[in-house]
Amino acid sequence: MTFVEIAPLVAGALFIALGIRVSLAESPPLAGRWRYPAALSAAFLLYSAYTVSREGPTGFWVEHTRNLWGVQIWFDLLQAALVGFVLLVPRARAQGLRLVPWLLAVAATGSIGLMAMVARVLYLEARTASGR
C-alpha cells in the first residue's frame, strides 16, 4: 500500500481512538491543553505546505469539482469548519479575540486555522484562570 492509501486509514483510526478517549475521560486541567491543537495545527500546516509545493496551490479545487463526491466533501468540510467556528465564537469573544481575522484564517486554511484558533482560546482561558 502507498502513503496515499495508508494515511486516510491511519487518520480515521486516530479520529475514532481520540474521540473515544475524549468521550470517556474526565476533563483535563486547563493548563497546557492548548498545546495539542497548536501541535496539530502546526503539523497539518507543514504537511499542507509540502502538498502545495508538490501539487500546486489550487489542487484542492480540482478535487472538489471533479464529481458529485468531491462537491459533497467540499460541502461537508465547509459545514464542519463553520460549526466549529460558530461554537468557538462565544469563548473567543469572551477572551477578547478579534473574530474576523480568525474567520478569514479558517476560510483560507480550514482546520489549520480552526485548530490554531482553538489553541489560542484555550491558551487565553488557561492564562485567565491562572490569574496572569
Image (tube, grey):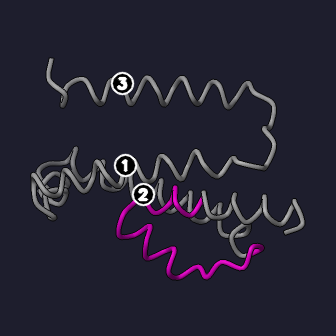
First of labels 2, 3 by sequence position: 3
Q: Residue 112, labelled with which disc?
A: 2
- Label 3: which residue? 10
Q: Which residues are magenta?
A: 94-118
Q: Residue 103, labelled with which disc?
A: none
Pointer 2 local density, CA inside 10 Å: few below 14, some 14–19, many at least 20: many
The chief SS type of the magenta part is helix
What SS does tag 1 mark?
helix
Q: Does the segment drawn in magenta span residue 130?
A: no
Q: Residue 44, labelled with which disc?
A: 1
Q: Does the segment drawn in magenta span residue 115?
A: yes
At 79% from the left edge and 49% from the top edge, which residue is drawn?
Answer: 30
Q: CA distance from mark 2 to mark 3?
A: 19 Å
The percent coordinates of residue 120 (x first, y second) are 62, 64
Pointer 3 local density, CA inside 10 Å: few below 14, some 14–19, many at least 20: few
At 51% from the left edge and 74% from the top edge, which residue is drawn?
Answer: 102
What SS does tag 2 mark?
helix
Q: Is residue 102 left or right of residue 119?
A: left
Q: Nearer the viewer, residue 130 or 8?
A: 130
- Quadrant for residue 118, please give it: bottom right
For the residues labelled 1 and 2, say whether their Cβ atoms are less than 8 Å apart. yes
At 55% from the left edge and 49% from the top edge, which residue is drawn?
Answer: 37
Mark 2 is on which residue type? Ile
Looking at the image, residue 55 lies above or below residue 20? below
At 81% from the left edge and 43% from the top edge, which residue is drawn?
Answer: 29
Q: CA distance from mark 1 to mark 3?
A: 14 Å
Mark 3 is on which residue type? Val
